[in-house]
Image (cartoon, helix red, strand yellow):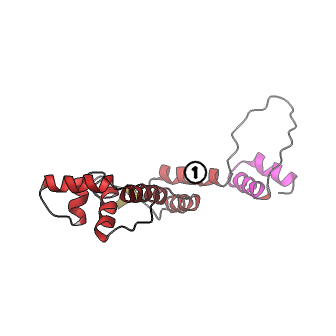
Amino acid sequence: MTDRPLTPKQQAFVREYVGRANGNGAEAARLAGYTGNAETLAAIASENLRKPHIASAIAEHREKTIADGILTAQECAVLLSGMATGMIGEAQPEGGEAPAKHATRIAAINSLAKMRGYEAPTKTEVTGALAVEVSLSPEQESALASWLLIRDDPRVRSILEEYGA
């Protein structure tokens, strides 16, 4: 941006042009407090948009608006956690919010697990002897052991007991 400061009306024009007016210069001029008929407002907008310091301010404002609209990983985790725990519900067509459906909560849990690097193993049928060495982080190992304990499978429990888990 150039060193030339924007007047309060120009600042309002930039804000409205990027915001409520959605790129409509005449509407941005009206919302910013400029007066006149449609032709006059269009002329004011055109003049403002030709000024380098205003065009630069619009570009900067757009960049900031876009950057502010992107969720961070932490924000995603917070929203998914809210869905998973049922603290955040689902929007209803008629307005308001209803408790999250079971499928939505499970999907949120799965998304959180993937974000954290935990994925439940898939079921595999072994038709012969196979030895595989797998290296897991302590967090992954703990998550896998917890997941396996949840399952009500006597074979899994006996294997875990055999390995002292």
Secondary structure state at the residue bearing disc 1: helix
Main secondary-structure element of the magenta-colored stretch: helix
Give the amino acid at mark 1. Answer: Ser
Q: Nearer the viewer, residue 99 or 50?
A: 50
Q: Nearer the viewer, residue 137 or 141?
A: 137
Q: Residue furthest left?
A: 37
- Where is residue 25? Give x, y as percent: 26, 53
Q: Residue at x 49, y 49 (%)?
A: 103
- Where is residue 22? Give x, y as percent: 30, 53
Binning the other alpha carbons within 10 Å of mark 1 as few (below 14), some (14 to 19) or many (20 upward) gives some
The magenta-colored residue range is 139-165
Query: Badge 1 is on which residue?
Result: 111
Indicate whether residue 5 is drawn in magenta.
no
User: In this image, 36 relative to 7: left or right?
Assistant: left
Q: Residue at x 63, y 50 (%)?
A: 114
User: In this image, 163 relative to 112: left or right?
Assistant: right
Above or below residue 148? Residue 129 is above
Q: Nearer the viewer, residue 13 or 76?
A: 13
Q: Residue furthest bottom?
A: 8
